[in-house]
Amino acid sequence: MNTNSRSRIREEEGQGWQRGQEGAERQEGQERHESQERQESQEGQEGRHQRILLTGGRAPATLDLARQLAAAGHKVYMAESCPVHLCYHSRAIVRNYSVPKPNEDPDGYISALQEIILQEKIDWLIPTCEEIFFVARGLDRLSQHCLVFTDSLDKLRRLHSKWEFIVQAREFDLFVPATSLLTSQEDVKAALAVPGKWVFKPVYSRFAAKVFMVQTRVASTVAKGEKNKEPDETEIPDETEILEKMKHLSPQQPWVAQQFIEGTVYCSYSIAKQGKLTAHAVYPVRFTAGPGACISFEAVHHPDIDRWVQHFVSLGQFTGQISFDFIVTDAGHVYPIECNPRATSGIHLFRVEDQLDQALFHHEEGSEQIITPRPGHKAIISLAMLSYGLLSIRSWFKFKEWLRLFMGGKDVVFRFRDPQPFFQQFRLLWWNVKVSRQQHISILEASTNDIEWNGEEEK
């Protein structure tokens, strides 16, 4: 690779999917020759169809992205450590590859991706689920051979942390809920002594797993009719029970206590390049699988959230896919709750005609165009709506809302022209049930057991 070629690529693509470090220049042999040819051919040919390697084939969002990319004429390949993943029999996938479990063999995982990239002459590697942290850790190696659509591991780690994300949002002069870091039992006791409604959760977690809420208060008046009774002390919930829920709490496995904010829950999904939004969607949270994972989606226009995301992404100069959870109060204040620096279900709101691939590959520098879904467009995960959704109904209003979404939303998995993933989801569910029993964890936790990353340092 000559210096001018590498300089042009860095100027075009920017931080986050660079072509490796200085040491990459000294690599010899056929791999270097092929890599140079691919880089030169990509310059000035942004409009051509790409050879894309996706990871995270277990997720409906990844399946949807694969279908949209294939419909746009790109060749899509899949690398996945789950043997019965959702995309396994999809017509959108040219070829599936089984790779090592990222959190058990991170070096083997990167080596496997590198082999696939070279064998299939991949142009772009796009991680979608939590394996993105392992891809980012191997960015120097992988970016020698193709463009990798992720930001640096250090930036991803800060966004993934439920503590550091709030700190960063505060640094950007954005509203944030009161949040404290917990690394010891003394920290927990101090948090419980503060009056209010508080949400406790691990700094690194997903699907709202292990999240619980605590109400504390201070009685400010004497009880009616009991004039001689002293005011109550601060009402502290049972510390033993709470500490048991947080028994693994330590500086290495910290938690946060976060102020509960009353309001409406929204999620956003965006694609960004060097701090510029190229695609963006917002949807309210109405039905979930358990306490966290959203299972119904309806695109809405929310200017305050739009401005919030643009502000954050711009100041952070972020590149990649990024998603946020928000609480919007009745007064209109937007409070961030957490960030997922990866793909999420917001992808389901984009249709083939929206040309989401343009946001990934062909967005021109300086362009202000942002691809957005059609307002009111609905999508659902049908099986989850028939189970989790129905079980959550507690009122006639909620049932009417469920019926409106279920009847008007398009299932994110089933397609007449690509029916196999619909049946594959039952095999995937059974696989997750088996893993949950073996590991004594929930089914949702089992679904990411081999790819989850909790801030571990590189070995």
Image (cartoon, helix red, strand yellow):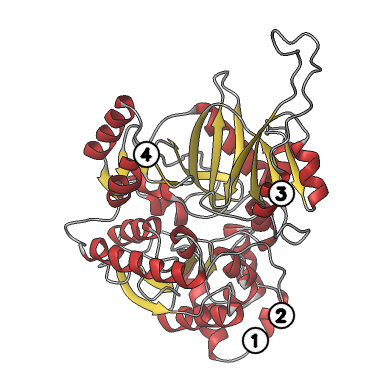
The Cα atoms of the two marked residues, 1 and 2, are separated by: 7 Å
Name the N-terminal-most of marks 3 and 1.
Answer: 1
**Disc 3 crowd, CA 10 A, few/some/many (<14, 14-19, 20+):** few
**Label 3 SS:** helix
Residue type, label 1: Gln
Name the N-terminal-most of marks 4 and 3.
Answer: 3
Check disc 1 and report the residue beneath it: 27
Residue nearest the observer in this picture, 453 or 158: 453
Give x and y (percent) for residue 288. Answer: 41, 43
Q: Is mark 1 in CB contact (under 8 Å) with mark 2? A: yes
Residue nearest the observer in this picture, 252 or 37: 252
**Label 4 SS:** loop
Quadrant containing the C terminus is bottom right
Give x and y (percent) for residue 68. Answer: 32, 56
Name the N-terminal-most of marks 4 and 2.
Answer: 2
Q: Is mark 1 in CB contact (under 8 Å) with mark 4? A: no
Check disc 2 and report the residue beneath it: 23
| Image height of 270 relative to 37, above or below | above
**Residue in the image at 48% along x and 46% along y:** 292
Q: Residue 240 carries which label?
A: 3
Residue type, label 4: Ser
Name the N-terminal-most of marks 1 and 4.
Answer: 1
Tell me the mark number nearer the camera, choosing from 4 and 2: 4
The Cα atoms of the two marked residues, 4 and 3, are separated by: 30 Å
Name the N-terminal-most of marks 3 and 2.
Answer: 2
Can you see residue 23? yes
Tell me the mark number nearer the camera, choosing from 1 and 4: 4
- Toward the bottom, the furthest residue is 29
